[in-house]
Amino acid sequence: MNVRRLPNGEYLLDLRGTICPYPVLYTKRALEKLKTGEVLSVIIDNPPSLETVPASVKASGHDVLEVREVEPAVWAIKIRRG
């Protein structure tokens, strides 16, 4: 799991090739390292994670800002730490 800070101040976690339950676990760990209000974009290519990651994030009190397809069968989930 490698969280990278982007020039715009947001963070990126690329989880392509990772299957459930790891996207949920790695996203949770990454968010724990951020300060309240900071933004994390999680890149996934595992379709079930489109449901499990946002649901887990919301249940933990964070905000899902956006879910979008960035290329065929690859999605970005943008999350603000609550």
Image: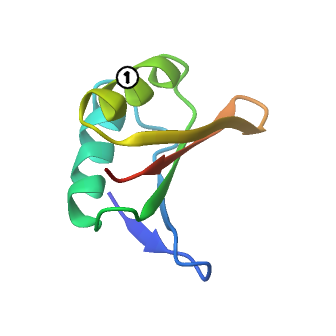
Q: In this view, which residue lies farthest toward the right?
A: 72
Residue at the image point whose x is 57% and y is 33% from the top:
45
Q: In this view, which residue lies farthest toward the bottom?
A: 7
Disc 1 packing (10 Å; few <14; some 14–19; many ≥20)? some
Residue 52 x %, y %: 39, 21
Residue at the image point whose x is 22% and y is 51% from the top:
29
Residue at the image point whose x is 39% and y is 66% from the top:
3
The answer to whether 31 appears left or right of 78 in the picture is left
Q: Mark 1 points at which residue?
A: 55
Residue at the image point whose x is 37% and y is 22% from the top:
55
Q: In this view, does 79 lie above or below 67?
A: below
Q: How many marks?
A: 1
Quadrant location, the N terminus: bottom left
Of residues 8 and 16, the one drawn nearer to the viewer in this rendering: 8
Of residues 18 and 34, the one drawn nearer to the viewer in this rendering: 34
Label 1 SS: helix
Picture quarter containing residue 19? top left
The kind of residue on which mark 1 rests is: Ala
Of residues 34 and 1, the one drawn nearer to the viewer in this rendering: 34
Q: In this view, does 6 lie above or below 48?
A: below
Residue 37 x %, y %: 39, 62
Q: Is residue 50 above or below residue 6?
A: above
